[in-house]
Image (cartoon, helix red, strand yellow):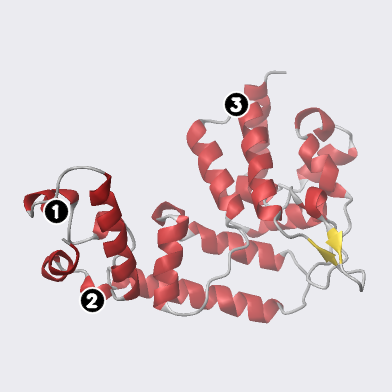
Amino acid sequence: ISAERIMVELVKTLVSDHPGMLRDAYECGLTRYFLPELDRIMELEQNNPHHCYTVGEHTIQAISNVPADRLLRLTMLFHDMGKAECMTFDEEGIAHYSGHEEISAEIAHKALTRLRFDRDTVTKVSHMVRFHDARIMAGEKYMRRAVARIGEEYFPMIFDIWEGDVLAQSLYKREEKLARVSRNREDYEAVMQKRQCISKAMLAVKGADLIAAGMKPGKEIGEVLDRMLEDVLEQPEHNTKEYLLDKYR
């Protein structure tokens, strides 16, 4: 069976009302032929108070907890795939998975490429997997920096990912985690409503303005724009052409 056909059927399953059918595919021995990455985590126990399922069962629960969107559910499918490679235990026997986000992103990139997903899907899913466990402090300043770091195009989807992940964990600190996601959503909405600058594209000054002000074309212009963005992320009221040109040209 071609990779393209498998890709189509996998997506149909993921965005259906019954993504848990992946569990049946595993139990029937089918996933080892088209998604062996899932086999590695299906029975991997998580000896950690934040979890009550195996990594695989947590994954299936997380898929069901996000909207039936192709990118979201593919992200949840791969978000914890790297845990099998980086699991360590502390002195009390509690499991930890430091760095699993990056490893999971690499696994997602390889598996999606193998299954002939388009480049845009591979890039976006891998990126969201990489940031599926990001932590953002409360406050608009921290949200501006988070959006600039993660990328505008991934918001507000990233909140669905964080919430879906939490709901597939144990009850340990669940309300606290969900409250954090809710505060992050509120900060994001406030930043958007106020149209605060979160990227170089939103800066009041463009490269052409710097050239017109006497700068020579080259990498220095990009460096200046980067410094301007850092300034504006910290103090959004600084995003005026007069202020930025006066301070940085």
Residue 17 can be seen in this image: no
Residue in front for this viewpoint, 9 or 159 = 159
Residue in front for this viewpoint, 211 or 101 = 211
Residue type indicated by callout 1 = Leu
Q: Which mark is residue 237?
A: 2
Q: In the rendered structure, which disc, 3 or 2, sits on the residue that comes first in sequence?
A: 3
Residue type indicated by callout 3 = Arg
Real-space CA distance between mark 1 and mark 2, rounded to the nearest whole angstrom = 20 Å
Q: Secondary structure at mark 2?
A: helix
* Residue 58 falls left or right of residue 163: right
Residue type indicated by callout 2 = Glu
Real-space CA distance between mark 3 and mark 1, rounded to the nearest whole angstrom = 43 Å
Residue highlighted by disc 1: 210
Residue sitting at 60 percent across and 52 percent down?
Answer: 130
Classify mark 2: residues with Cα within 10 Å, few (<14), some (14-19) or many (20+).
few
Dot in front, 1 or 2: 1
Q: Position of residue 195 (x, y in %)?
A: 27, 68
Q: In the rendered structure, which disc, 1 or 2, sits on the residue that comes first in sequence?
A: 1
Quarter of the image where the N terminus is located: top right
Residue 18 can be seen in this image: yes
Residue sitting at 42 percent across and 62 percent down?
Answer: 147
Q: Which mark is residue 30?
A: none
Q: Residue furthest top?
A: 1
Residue highlighted by disc 3: 116
The quarter holding residue 2 reads top right
Q: In the rendered structure, which disc, 3 or 1, sits on the residue that comes first in sequence?
A: 3
